[in-house]
Amino acid sequence: MKLKKLISAVNIALFFAFTVILALATLILPKSGFSELENRYLAESPKLSARSWFSKEYPTDLGEYLQEHFALRTNWISLRTSLERLLGHDEVNGIYFADGRFFEASEPIDYSRIDRSVSAINSFAEGLGGRLSVMIVPTSSQIYIDRLPDYSPDPGQRRMINYVYSALSEDIRTVDVYDRLYRAREDYIYYRTDHHWTTAGAYIAYCEFARAIGYDPVALDRIDIEHARHDFLGSYYSKVISDEAEPDTVDIYSSDGAEVTSVKITAPDGSVSERDSVYFREYLDKKDKYLTFLGENVPLVEIESDAGGGSLLIIKDSYANCFAPFLTKHFSKVTLVDLRYMMSLSDYVDVSEYDRILILYNASTFAEDANIAKLSAK
């Protein structure tokens, strides 16, 4: 009996000591404001005040700060995933494990938000004289829905895309890439560990868009495909940190014809930098290798080439980053704008200067992004 009590006391003491050590390590160890693994900024240390304390804002923010900066946090995420998988769970932290891939669990679509976005796009299209096209791209969770667990809800993206396209003005050209992507689903068109499509998926959409506006797309047999890296572990992986992940390959497509002459990047703080390529190869050596395509999300990217063609404005999310380089073969100026990083589109571009305008979003972002409403102000 005494031995059992002694063992119990030792276990309690060890657990208490381990907890205290972790807590002290969390408080003492240097903190990083940015998590490269999760590709996001972490919570900042909250400031204590009488207002924040009595409103319970401070305890809440402190809990979030300690959780995000907890010592050995990535190890705990990985351990939790392993335990969940041992228990037979197919979903961990909002990520489904299926058919050797990771998929994101879907939230119900808010059609009132969809209606506001559609209304803004229709308002934006007024006076553009048929220059506007819209492309909404399904994510991997929709294209591979039959491979998800039976209990997972239908993302509803097919229905949502049809709803949006039917509600847009008649002078807006809709580019439906759903069927083409679905038919190519056995090919490598989406990353296994990340929420983006691959360059192969973007190429399929490029061909559809080019034909829709009267251009002949560059044939695949004229394109050189460079398998730049084979060790990409993307955003889905970062949520689970699982050994089950099969690293992705980042492909860079290049062909003859027009060449890019200038890439001008306007950052959120207004600073401007220039490059001579749409491929930012330094990111191949970093965690988020998708940033190889035009780098981090910024308000404005202006690409110039010697194509000798017209100009194209792309209003977009990050799906457009590996899509836009294909269009530099047809347009001498391709400009990309991200509404999430600006108050008004007119602060950055004059839409009257562009021959063609494309709104390109993945279906998940389109359903959730309230910034599309900014288009109503042009």
Image (cartoon, helix red, strand yellow):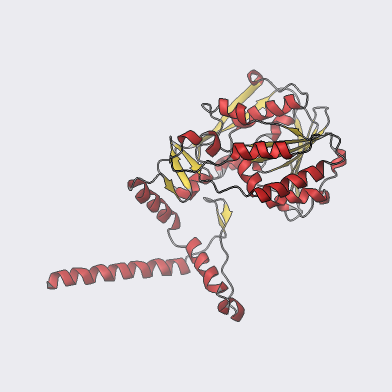
**Residue 119 in view here:** yes
| Front residue of this view, candidates 291 and 342 | 342
Residue at 48% x, 34% y is 146
Residue at 82% x, 45% y is 349
User: Which of the 4 quarters of the picture holds residue 331?
Assistant: top right
User: Which of the 4 quarters of the picture holds residue 42?
Assistant: bottom right
Q: Residue 35: image x %, image y %?
A: 54, 54
Q: Describe residue 330's horizontal placement relative to residue 108 as left or right.
A: right
Identify the residue at the far left of this view.
Answer: 1
Residue at 65% x, 30% y is 177
**Residue 338 in view here:** no
**Vertically, is 17 above or below 104?**
below
Q: Describe residue 222's horizontal placement relative to residue 129 as left or right.
A: left
Q: Quadrant of the N terminus?
A: bottom left
Q: Residue 217: image x %, image y %?
A: 71, 23
| Front residue of this view, candidates 260 and 147 | 147
| Front residue of this view, candidates 133 and 297 | 133
Identify the residue at the far top of this view.
Answer: 221
**Vertically, is 213 above or below 118?**
above
Q: Residue 323: image x %, image y %?
A: 67, 34
| Front residue of this view, candidates 129 and 345 | 129
